[in-house]
Image (spheres, coloured by chain):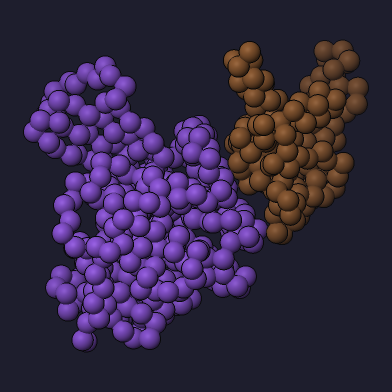
Amino acid sequence: MSIVKDYMFRTLNSVSKDDLIEDVIKIMYKTELSVLPVVDPENKLLATIYSNNILKNIIPEQFGFLESHRIFYEINQSVENLAEIKGRKVSEYMSKNTDFVHEDDDMNKIADIMLHNKESLLFVVNEAGFLRGYISRADLLHYLLDQAKEL
Amino acid sequence: MITTVTLNPSIDREYFVDSNQVMKNQYIYTDEDVRVYPGGKGLIAAINLKNLGYTDVQNIGFVGGKQGLYFEKMVQNLDLTTNYINTDNEIRNNVKIIGKDPFTYTQYNDYTYSVDDYDVNQLIKRFKRGITSSKLIMIAGSIPEGVDFSIYKKLTNICHEMGKEVYLQASGEALNLALETEPRFVVPYFKHHKTILDKEIKTQSEFIEAGKRLQEHGARNVIIPFHCDRLLFAENGSVYKLTPEDYCIRNWLGASDAYNAGFFDYIERYGCDFLEANRQGAAAALSISESKSVFLESRKEITLNMSRIIIQELEV
């Protein structure tokens, strides 16, 4: 039986709920991730913060359906909105309904979870709930490819 | 979880050529003649500890730029947990050219990596929550440009506030300042400085005097490399000389990292017996120095060398 630990990315890259949105954006850009785990002072997983959630809060709702002459105005509006929220705390924008998996979970369980929700990656915790890393759809496909080789 | 800290890691690139000559273009066509691996004192010790069977080993530090992502991927392939602050500047590269016949070794050490205050503050925040599951933290190696020399002092203070002990391998001003925090184990190294506490040392008596001064300045236990031996300064004031018996050195690379890992492994398994932990560290270093490998492969090779390590108390 293959377990999550065999395929996961073992990283404690994370933010706390008191970090700022600006910090989150910098980390996302540098690590090429669009979602980050939010942890408590002991590194226990609390929530997640998505780039999409930040974007939704700065881009006007009707963006993308506007006539071309309005687009520059809306972009400026987005920049202004970001300037306003970049100093706010992660706790205001994080998502508490977070699916996570355990490092000793069966990889088949991951397949099931990923197929039935929109998560591109799932954060991994140990038995005590401490963050241990994440597992992505690419990792799942890597696992399935390994299985296919055995057929 | 075992935690090691590497603030100034590097991508180490080894190129093997038939004969290394200046002003000559060399062409390398075989994979075996190029080795690329992640480097840095705390990191190599972490790799060794992983090889000794510890499942949860993390390395905390900075990595930079796109090459930093590549570095992290290499560390991930070794099944270590990474806890890195990603910086804007690219991580450094060390280049080593090894001539096969005649044997030559030429190394270009890159110390251009720099880190800004923002990233240092991020590291301190991440360090605080990263060490909660560790008892003894290994902090080892140089510090990048832009990081204040007081960084090891700050990290050691955080460890002590959280009830953790520190194994510190450092040099120069970063070491001098950290001594004020009274770290449990101190290992000075001389790669960049031929001095300890700003005083040049050459003879055994000067090394012994330096060890005692380190203790006067705050270090509780001190381990000083002295040629192929180690001078050990225990907390109770006793001084010992550790010597490997009948050895044949084939390789220097990785020996001190293996020492750190062997020492650490002993403390994790049996608690703090300073002399026996050093005996195991030395046995680990011996197994690397008599092999071609940079990394420990198993605990068995250490056990075989334990009886070859002699520890003698010195009259001082």
In the displayed orientation, state which residue is furthest to the left: B102
Chain A shade:
brown
Q: Can I make out residue B115 in this image?
A: no
Left/right of residue A136 with respect to residue B224 in the rendered view = right
Q: How far across and how far down the image is residue B220, in percent?
A: 41, 79
| Residue B269, percent from left and from top | 50, 64
Identity of the residue drawn at 57% across and 50% down: B56
- At horizontal 38% and vertical 86% (from top left) the residue drawn is B236
Of B238 and A32, the residue lying toward us: B238
Chain B on-screen colour: purple
Relative vertical location of residue B171 with respect to residue B33 in this rendering, above or below? below
The N terminus of chain B, quarter of image:
bottom right
Which quarter of the figure is the C terminus of chain B placed in? bottom left
Residue B31 rendering spot, x and y as whole percentages:
31, 22
Query: In the depicted view, which residue is nearer to us: A133 or B119?
Result: A133
Which one is nearer the viewer's eye here, B96 or A10? A10
Q: How many marks?
A: 0
Camera sees residue B94:
yes
Q: Is residue A109 left or right of residue B141?
A: right
Q: Quadrant of residue B245?
A: bottom left
Q: Residue at x 32, y 78 (%)?
A: B233
Asked if residue B66 lies left or right of residue B292, the reply is right
Please, is residue B197 above or below residue B143 in the view?
Answer: below
Q: Residue at x 85, y 32 (%)?
A: A56
Instruction: Please indicate whether residue B305 sits to the left or right of residue A129 in the image.
Output: left
Image position of A79 with respect to A43: above or below: above
**Relative image position of residue B18 (x, y in whole percent):** 15, 25
